[in-house]
Amino acid sequence: MIQIQKDDLSDGAIERLLNTHIQEMYKHSPAESVHAIDPEKLKDPSVTFWSARINNELVGCGALKELYSSVGEIKSMKTDENHLRKGIGARLLSEIITEARKRSYGEISLETGSNEAFNPAITMYEMHGFVECPPFGEYKLDPYSKFYTKKLSVNL
């Protein structure tokens, strides 16, 4: 059973998973196109971080960063390679969307890679109602990035 909970990033396993995530981004994109947040910056008060565990083993993570009082950005979505295609990313995404609604965000957005390695993630985002959009926040148009947004209703 997958357990999703807010996390303070004090677990070394989380840092290893995030470092693996960053290394993978560099395999598919040049350095200037890698937008993964450094694990230290995830401790910023504007960021809420979740971990996913099965039998206390870290299997995934994700974060929600407040861009503005009504807009959030999904960051650091990652599933451990030994647990892909088990619904972990979808569960994390659902938890993040629920939190964004609780905060009365009108929308949440995300940046992901454009390489075929990102197709499973893109499919998941689209299945959850995200649609492609222009760059947002401080992002700029980049052939290695795709941008998505989802309008939220705040009625739970």
Image: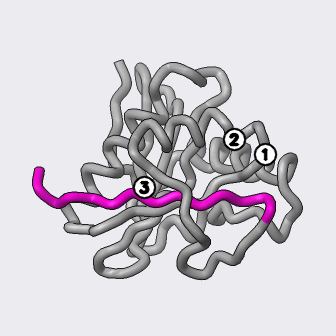
- Kindly identify the residue that appears in the image at 80 percent across and 49 percent down: 23
Magenta stretch bounds: 143-156
Q: Amino acid at mark 1?
A: Asn
Give percent across and percent down for residue 86: 50, 20
Quadrant location of the N terminus? top left
- Kindly identify the residue that appears in the image at 38 percent across and 34 percent down: 91
The earlier-in-sequence mark between 2 and 3 is 3
Q: CA distance from mark 1 to mark 2?
A: 6 Å
Q: Say if mark 2 contacts mark 3, CB within 8 Å.
A: no
Q: Which residue is mark 1?
A: 115
Q: Secondary structure at mark 2?
A: helix
Q: Nearer the viewer, residue 30 or 12?
A: 30
Q: Amino acid at mark 3?
A: Phe
Q: Is residue 153 left or right of residue 90?
A: left
Is residue 96 placed above or below 60 in the rendered structure? Answer: below
Q: Nearer the viewer, residue 93 or 132?
A: 132
- Kindly identify the residue that appears in the image at 51 percent across and 46 percent down: 11
Q: Secondary structure at mark 3?
A: strand
Q: CA distance from mark 2 to mark 3?
A: 21 Å
Q: Quadrant of residue 155?
A: bottom left
Disc 2: CA contacts within 10 A as few (<14), some (14-19) or many (>=20): some
Give percent across and percent down for residue 48: 38, 61
Is residue 96 placed above or below 117 in the rendered structure? Answer: below
Disc 1: CA contacts within 10 A as few (<14), some (14-19) or many (>=20): few
The earlier-in-sequence mark between 1 and 3 is 3
